[in-house]
Image (cartoon, rainbow, N blue to C red):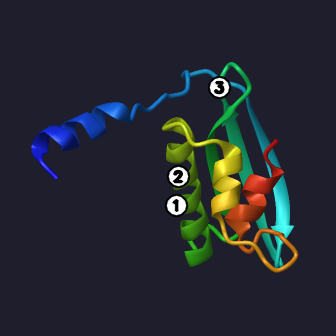
Amino acid sequence: MDIEHKSEQRDALRRYRLPNRRPAETVAFERERSRYEMTVGYYPDGRPGEVFLNADRADSLLDVLMSDAAILASLALQYGASMDELRHALKRDSRGAAASPIGAALDLIT
């Protein structure tokens, strides 16, 4: 890949940041005997644009992994991925239910 092609590719990606003041909602849920709290920030048009997810035990490995997964989901949303694309990309069990807490969290977002 030449340098010119990399530059064109980088220019094609554009991050749409949320305004400083935005609507948000917080939801608590349980998954496999662990409690989580998720906050979703929305663009003015109602699309979700950021996700914060924390496990009940602060700074535990699970808490860190969920926080990092939420950051990645937020960046994907801000670069134009849809919530349906994110949900579809995550692992599901044989019944179609989310296999992970981040998948379950994204399923809660309307």
Residue 32 pos. (x, y %): 82, 79
Cα separation, mark 3 vs mark 1, equals: 21 Å
Task: Please name the amino acid that badge 3 sits on.
Answer: Tyr
Residue type for callout 1: Asp
Residue picked out by circle 3:
43
Q: Residue 46: which quarter of the image?
A: top right
Q: Indicate which disc, 3 or 2, sits on the residue closer to the N terminus.
A: 3
Which of the image's four quarters has the C terminus? top right
Residue 102 position in % (x across, y down): 68, 63
Q: How many numbered discs, if any?
A: 3
**Residue extending furthest right?**
95
Q: Secondary structure at mark 3?
A: loop
- Quick one: SS at disc 2? helix
7 shown above or below 107: above
Relative to residue 85, is residue 45 depicted above or below?
above
Q: Earlier in the sequence, mark 3 or mark 1?
A: 3
Q: In this figure, which residue is indicated by the disc labeled 1?
A: 68
**Residue at horizontal 61 percent and vertical 65 percent from the top:** 66
Please tell me whether mark 3 or mark 1 is closer to you in this view: 3
* Residue 28 position in % (x across, y down): 83, 55
| Disc 2 packing (10 Å; few <14; some 14–19; many ≥20) | some
Name the residue carrying label 2.
Answer: 71
Label 1 packing within 10 angstroms: few (<14), some (14-19), many (20+): some
Taking the spot 56% from the left edge, 77% from the top edge, the residue there is 61
Q: Nearer the viewer, residue 69 or 95?
A: 95
Q: Residue at x 20, y 37 (%)?
A: 7
Cα separation, mark 2 vs mark 1, equals: 5 Å
Q: Say if mark 2 contacts mark 1, CB within 8 Å.
A: yes
- Secondary structure under badge 1? helix
Instruction: Give percent across and percent down for residue 97.
Output: 83, 70
Picture quadrant where residue 98 is located? bottom right
Q: How far apart, in angstroms, are the residues tagged by discs 3 and 2?
A: 16 Å
